[in-house]
Image (tube, rainbow, N blue to C red):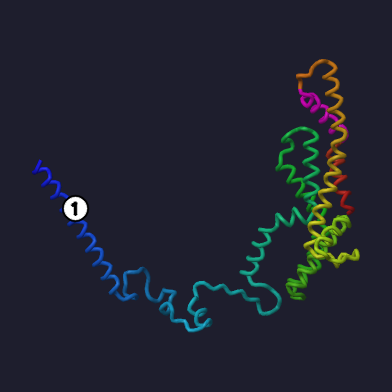
Amino acid sequence: MKKYFSGYHLAKLVCLLLLAGILFSRKTTALAATDTPYRESNLTGTTDERTNERAPGTAENADDLAEMNIANTVTITYGNGNGSVNGALRILVILTLIAIAPTLIIMMTSFTRIIIVLHFTRQALNTQTAPPNTVLIGIALFLTFFIMQPTLTSIYTEAVVPYEAGEMNEEEALTKAAAPIRQFMYGQTFKKDVSLFMDINRLEWSGELDEIPMSVLVPSFIISELRRAFIIGFLIYIPFIVIDMVVASTLMSMGMMMLPPTTISMPFKILLFVLADGWYLIIKGLVESFNL
């Protein structure tokens, strides 16, 4: 037992000595690295490639600090003062427009009404995923571009072309570009919706478009679009509800209560939709509802 404890203590002593040696060697290495000059250390690269031209903390004012911080500054310039924008700013504007384009398309165009009506049509037919969402969104997008084509053309001719030619600055171009969009939204917006948001903002309104701020016109337009879309959806549902009621009454009179009525009524709905040329009527009604 005595020899066992002696061997145990000896092993413990050897471990402590090894640990002390490792700590001493790390401390010596750290001191040696501290004593080495900063520019003569073993860092990668050369002194000419370094971004800190002076030691940290030597700036005396803001201009001096900006001059030292050369690695974290971005500069945007205009080309020769002729109204054209350089490539970096064009890329920034394009990326910003791409980021907010889905919101603009959904909230400020005819897309909302079209996609809701198409969704109601599919639900009324009870076809579940036919047509699929991709097809419905594609149809809604192309119809949106078709309906908004006069507005987009007006924006291009009245705002984009003069701005590219240097005939107006950014603020004037944005004002010119917003005018056709505002005119389109105002033509599809109920006055009571505009009055609602004007009263909430405690603003006086005499009925003129120029007095409506964009923060009021956009939500008013969205509410009006939802109202029209649900009205059209209700009208689409009526003939298909009649078919469901007839089929359900027939099955109940025959004692076939365990058979779901939708299983029998769906083929009749599709037949009625095809015979009435439903897609033609719905698309025609949607386009004409925008008073083009």
Badge 1 is on which residue? Answer: 15
Q: Residue 273 vs residue 12: left or right?
A: right
Q: Is residue 257 left or right of residue 289?
A: left
Residue 251, horizontal then vertical, whole percent: 82, 19
Q: Residue at x 81, y 15 (%)?
A: 255
In the rendered view, does 15 fall on the left or right side of 110?
left
Point out the image quarter for the N terminus: top left
Query: Camera-side residue: 88 or 193?
Result: 193
Q: Main secondary structure of the magenta part?
A: helix
Q: Residues within 10 Å of mark 1 (few under 14, many from 20)?
A: few
Residue 127, horizontal then vertical, whole percent: 75, 33
* Residue 189 in magenta stretch: no
- The local secondary structure at tag 1 comes to helix
Residue 99 as seen in the image, left or right of residue 200: left
The percent position of residue 199, horizontal first and vertical second, equals 84, 61
In the displayed image of the protein, which residue is found farthest to the top? Answer: 255
Quarter of the image with the C terminus is bottom right
Please give the name of the residue rendered at 49% of the width and 73% of the height, measured from the top-left corner: 71
Residue 206 placement: quadrant: bottom right
| Magenta region | 260-276
Residue at image x 34%, y 75%?
Answer: 38
Picture coordinates of residue 44 (x, y %)? 36, 68
Q: Quadrant of residue 80?
A: bottom right
